[in-house]
Image (tube, rainbow, N blue to C red):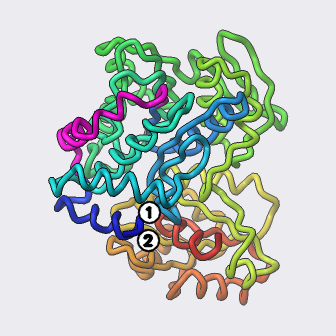
Amino acid sequence: MNSDQLLEKMGHLHPKVMDLSLGRMHRLLAALGNPERKLPPVIHIAGTNGKGSTQAMIRAGLEAAGHIVHAYTSPHLARFHERIRLAGALISEADLVAVLTETMDINAGESITYFEITTCAAMLAMSRVEADYTLLEVGLGGRLDTTNVVESPRLTIITPISLDHQNFLGDTLPEIAGEKAGILKRGVPCIVGPQPDEVRAVIEAEAGKVGARLLIAGQDWHSFEERGGMVYQDEMGLLDLPLPALIGAHQVENAGAAVCALRILGADTAEAAVLKAEWPARMQKLKYGPLIKAAPHAELWLDGGHNPAAGKALAEALTRLPDRPLYMVCGMLNTKDIGGYLAPLAASAVKLTGVSIPGETATLSAYEICVAARANSMEADTAESVTDAVARVVAEAPTARILLCGSLYLAGRILQDNG
């Protein structure tokens, strides 16, 4: 079987897609010989927004310093292989098939979620390839996330926390913060990105319980934009840096956490971190594919942010671009707060076109997206597909800026077709 067929089988091993617990992980990892204990030093990253961007900047900085780095992230956009990076390169199809097959065989049909068994497979693969560091991104929450089986990481990071996944993590920011803070470990330093006061208080209380040292944004380190560049400062001194290649004020904050991590790890490569990091579907300008050919005079941007905080960050990032009329093509899951996401973007857009996400049973319908847009005083219409939506925009405004947005799942489908 190829990797897609194996992954399909793995998706049927447990009745629930999400079932936060660590018991099944510990069982399978023990049967696999506890690969989580054999990983190169782990940097464990939790948070609501900015995990992937922060990871990408840390990886760019570590690799610029000559280090070999594994990375694990989720979800993938176009192919599952994106989740597992071994010694700097995406896992090959042959290696992925081998490790998935081995993990499936050892699991022997026992109940386990898709994310749990694939995380076990990733840890097994990373434990067998030499590297200097492992960058491990939390999937959901922290305390009961499948990645929270590493007993002694080298470093933990908590990026900005906001409301998301309330059906799993709690209805309030303090409840969600308590789950995210579950990655804190005794004696392990934790870098804390900018947080609301009520979130920071929860993290500080949890750190006090477990004995973790915190390095808090705005207290122990500072990162801000000044005169067209970025300034980073901590007790080790001040750095004048260029603005991150990833666009937006929120990326200056993420870059600060990444630079703080690199300084703790002894890597003097802050400039490489902010300039060389790449992270798809985060204000990514599309350059290839059928959509570009269909809109040769337009700008097409892709962003997978999907909660109110992401909408706010996206709205700010758009202000950094030269003026063009903005048209939005939006698809989103029905588990997300679409009204909260659209609110900060409403004033900037000429029009929104709603689309459903192909192949996703939890997608909002194009009509439901239009209803939410109109509730935010936006002009809105529906289209059968992203291709149809882009064609309509180009017919109305050939040189428009077209923002394809609302979901990483939608972004993944677009990248599959336009990579």
x, y percent for residue 295: 75, 81
Q: Could you tell me which residue is drawn at 61 percent across and 72 percent down?
A: 328
In the image shown, does 85 or 344 lie closer to the viewer? 85
Q: Could you tell me which residue is drawn at 37 percent across and 24 percent down?
A: 184
**Farthest right residue in view:** 227
Q: Could you tell me which residue is drawn at 60 percent across and 36 percent down?
A: 254
Asked whether the viewer can see residue 157, the reply is: no
Quadrant of the rendered structure where residue 148 is?
top left
In the image shown, does 83 or 385 lie closer to the viewer? 83
Marking on residue 372 = 2
* Residue type at the position of mark 1: Gly
In the image shown, does 363 or 63 lie closer to the viewer? 63
> Which quadrant would the C terminus be assigned to in this image?
bottom right
* Residue type at the position of mark 2: Ala
x, y percent for residue 1: 36, 69
x, y percent for residue 134: 50, 34
Task: State yes or no: residue 40 in magenta.
Answer: yes
| Left-right relation of 244 to 101 | right
In the image shown, does 184 or 2 lie closer to the viewer? 2
Question: Dots 2 and 1: beta carbons under 8 Å?
Answer: yes
| Left-right relation of 324 to 312 | right
The Cα atoms of the two marked residues, 2 and 1, are separated by 6 Å
| Left-right relation of 321 to 213 | right
> Does residue 304 sit above or below 296 in this rendering?
above
Point out the stretch of residues depicted in magenta.
Answer: 19-43
Q: Which residue is mark 1?
A: 339
Asked whether the viewer can see residue 28, the reply is: yes
Q: Quick one: label 1, few (<14), some, or many (20+) residues within 10 Å?
A: some
> Does residue 75 sit above or below 152 in this rendering?
below
Q: Could you tell me which residue is drawn at 84 percent across and 33 percent down?
A: 227
